[in-house]
Image (tube, rainbow, N blue to C red):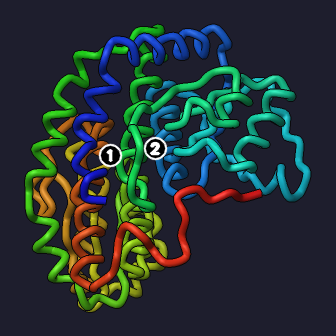
Amino acid sequence: MAADIAEQPDVYATLLEPAHITAIERVAKAVIEHKPQHVVFTARGTSDHAALYGTYLSEIRLNLAAGLASPSAITVFGARPDLSHALVVGVSQSGGSPDLTEVLRVARESGALTLAVTNNPESTLVQTAELSIDVSAGHERAVAATKTYTAELFALLLLIEGIKNGGSVPVKEFAEIPALARQTLESNDATAQAQRYRFARSMVTTGRGYSYPSAREAALKLMETSYLPALAFSGADLLHGPLAMTDPDVPVLAFVNSGRGGEAMKPVLERLHDQRADVVTVGPGGALAVPSVDERFSPLLEILPLQQLALSLALAKGEDPDAPRGLKKVTATM
C-alpha cells in the first residue's frame, strides 16, 4: 500500500503525457458530437467516489444533470430505463464487475453513448462500451485502492475539462499537479495523527462540493484497512441530524478546501466546535495540510494524507493494510 501511494505523482504525470491527452481528447470530441442531455455514472466501492466527483464536475463545469445509477435496478429488478439521451460512464479499476458491464450493455441498447474508465484496457467493461479511457495507473499491489482511485479522478477531470474546452484538454492548467502531489506526500502529519487515533472507536468524515467524495473515500479507507467504523456525511447533511452524535470522543475529519466548498464548511466547523468535537481539518493550513489549489483539483491532493493516515493507523493497530480480512482485489457483484 505504501508503494502504491508513493507512485501517485508519477501516475498523474503519465496521464499528462501527449499520448494519453490525445486519447482523452478523442473521447471528449466524441461526447461533444453526441450532445448528451445528461450524464449517468455507474461504479462500485472506491470507484463510486470517483464517479461522485464526476457528477460534481459534470453539473458544475458542463451544466449537465448528472447522477449515479443503481446497478441492481437493472441486474436484480430488470429495469430498462430510457438512457437514449445520456452519456453513461462506467468507472471501475478492474473493469471486471458483471453488474457494471450489464448497466453499460443495457444503456447502449437504449441508445446511450457509453464510456468505460478503467485501469484495464482489456476488460469486459471496455469491450462493452463504445468509448474508453485507460487511467494507466499500472499494477496496484494492495487490496485497498489508492493510485487507481486518484487516476480515475484525474482522468475524469481531464475529460470533462476537455469537453468544456471544445475537445482540447487545457494541459497547462494541470502541469503542477504531479509536483504538488509529491509535496503533499512528503509530509509526516498523517503518521502523527495515526498515533492520536489509535484507540478511537469510531470516526466521522465530512466535506462539501468537490471535497465530499474525498470524505466518502477517506471513510472507506479507514474501514477497510483499520476496521474503524467511519461515517461520511456532506457538511450540509451532517447538520441535519448526525451532528447530534459528535462529541469529544468522536473524531471528525473535515475537508476544507480553498474554494466555495471550503467556505460552505465554515458554519459546519462552528457547529462542531459548539459540540466540543475533536476536529482535524484537511486542506490548506489544516492539521493535515494540502497545498491551496483550484477546488476542482482539491480531491487529487486532499485524499493523499488520508491514504497515509489509513496506512499508518492500520500499522499502529497491528493490522496488515495490504491484506484486509475478507476482501479481494476484484469484487464481482451482480
Q: Position of residue 177 (x, y in %)?
A: 21, 32
Q: Nearer the viewer, residue 1 or 296?
A: 1
Q: Position of residue 85 (x, y in %)?
A: 75, 24
Q: Amino acid at mark 2?
A: Tyr
At a point 47% along the width and 66% down the height, the residue shown is 237
Reading the image, the residue beneath label 2 is: 53
At a point 46% along the width and 23% down the height, the residue shown is 159
* Image quarter of the N terminus: bottom left
Identify the mark nearer the N-term, 2 or 1. 2
Q: Position of residue 129 (x, y in %)?
A: 70, 27
Left or right of 105 in this view: 149: left
Question: Label 1 near label 2: C-beta < 8 Å?
Answer: yes
Around disc 2, counting alpha carbons within 10 Å, would you say few (fewer than 14), some (14 to 19), or many (20 or more)?
many
- Label disc, if present, on residue 160 of the rendered structure: none
**Residue 263 showing in the rendered view:** no
- Label disc, if present, on residue 299 of the rendered structure: 1
Q: Is residue 138 above or below residue 305?
A: above
Q: Is residue 300 above or below residue 330?
A: above
Label 1: which secondary element? helix
Q: CA distance from mark 2 to mark 1?
A: 8 Å
Which quadrant of the view contains residue 314?
bottom left
